[in-house]
């Protein structure tokens, strides 16, 4: 049997072949790794990204407006007593009769009378005088309105329709009234007494009211 011997050149060639294979595997592995990384990066870049919700920065709480200074409620404006609605009076109606004064035909014979708030009132005005017959009426106004009603009545002297209106002023001061009666005429005036107070009544024929007046006291 003959022995086979290997020369040094053959052994070194085999080693280099092995090294070349290893180097080729390493280089191929790195090439595959970077290629895959590049593909993944391209894919991620091409795919649409979901918008990231912006988180609003916390805002400082708005400063509260300074509270308005407390105000004292204004005193209620005085309401005319006539506008108040008194409770109904359970008693009988008050029946009053008024006529010109016998001694002074430019005055009423009844200068004042009393009724209850909410009471039914029936005033019979009998415009009769034995000696000096004249035209008269009865106008009942709000408390404290006598002078104003007299002034308004005097202004109606120059009005072309003053006589036709019976010289009865138009305004909130006037509550109840008869018409302007000729001598010997009678009229019944009925109403419900307003809230408590002193209510003037007068004849608004020009010049008469200064003397021909009185007061209805409502209790």
Image: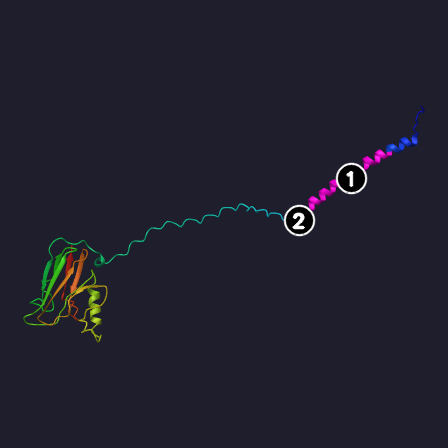
Quarter of the image where one finds residue 11: top right
Residue appearing at x 67%, y 46% in the figure: 43
Return the residue nearer the eye: 176 or 32: 32
Q: Is the stretch drawn in magenta largely helix, strand or loop?
A: helix
x, y percent for residue 179: 15, 69
Q: Could you tell whether 92 is left or right of 44 in the image? A: left
The residue to which callout 2 is attached is: 46
Pick the quarter of the image with the C terminus. Answer: bottom left
Name the colouring of the figure.
Answer: rainbow
At mark 2, the secondary structure is helix
Residue 23 is one of the magenta-drawn residues: yes
Which of the pair 112/40 is nearer the observer?
40
Spatial separation of the CA atoms under disc 1 and disc 2: 27 Å
Is residue 115 depicted above or below 147 in this figure?
above
Q: Which residues are magenta?
A: 16-45
x and y percent of residue 59 in the render? 52, 46
Image quadrant where one finds the N terminus: top right
Query: Which residue bears the numbered disc 1?
Result: 28
**Residue farthest along the right direction in this orientation:** 2
User: How many C-alpha atoms fall within 10 Å of the one at disc 2: few (<14), some, or many (≥20)?
Assistant: few
Q: Answer yes or no: do the residues labelled 1 and 2 have beta carbons within 8 Å?
A: no
């Amino acid at each position: 049997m003959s022995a086979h011997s290997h020369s040094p050149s053959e052994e070194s060639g085999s080693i280099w072949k092995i090294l070349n294979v290893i180097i080729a595997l390493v280089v191929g592995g790195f090439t595959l790794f970077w290629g895959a990384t590049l593909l993944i990066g391209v894919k991620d870049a091409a795919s649409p990204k979901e918008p990231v919700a912006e988180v609003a920065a916390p805002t400082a709480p708005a400063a509260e407006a300074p509270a308005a200074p407390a105000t004292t409620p204004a005193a209620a404006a005085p309401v005319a007593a006539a506008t108040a609605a008194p409770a109904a009076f359970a008693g009988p109606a008050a029946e009053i009769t008024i006529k010109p004064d016998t001694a002074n035909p430019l005055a009423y014979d009844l200068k004042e009378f009393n009724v209850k708030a909410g009471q039914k009132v029936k005033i019979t005005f009998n415009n009769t005088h034995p000696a000096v017959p004249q035209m008269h009426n009865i106008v009942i106004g709000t408390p404290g309105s006598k002078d104003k009603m007299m002034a308004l009545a005097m202004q109606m002297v120059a009005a072309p329709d003053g006589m036709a209106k019976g010289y009865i002023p138009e305004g909130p001061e006037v509550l109840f009234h008869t018409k302007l009666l000729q001598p010997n005429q009678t009229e019944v005036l009925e109403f419900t007494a307003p809230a408590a107070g002193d209510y003037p009544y007068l004849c608004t024929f020009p010049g008469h009211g200064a003397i021909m007046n009185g007061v209805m006291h409502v209790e």
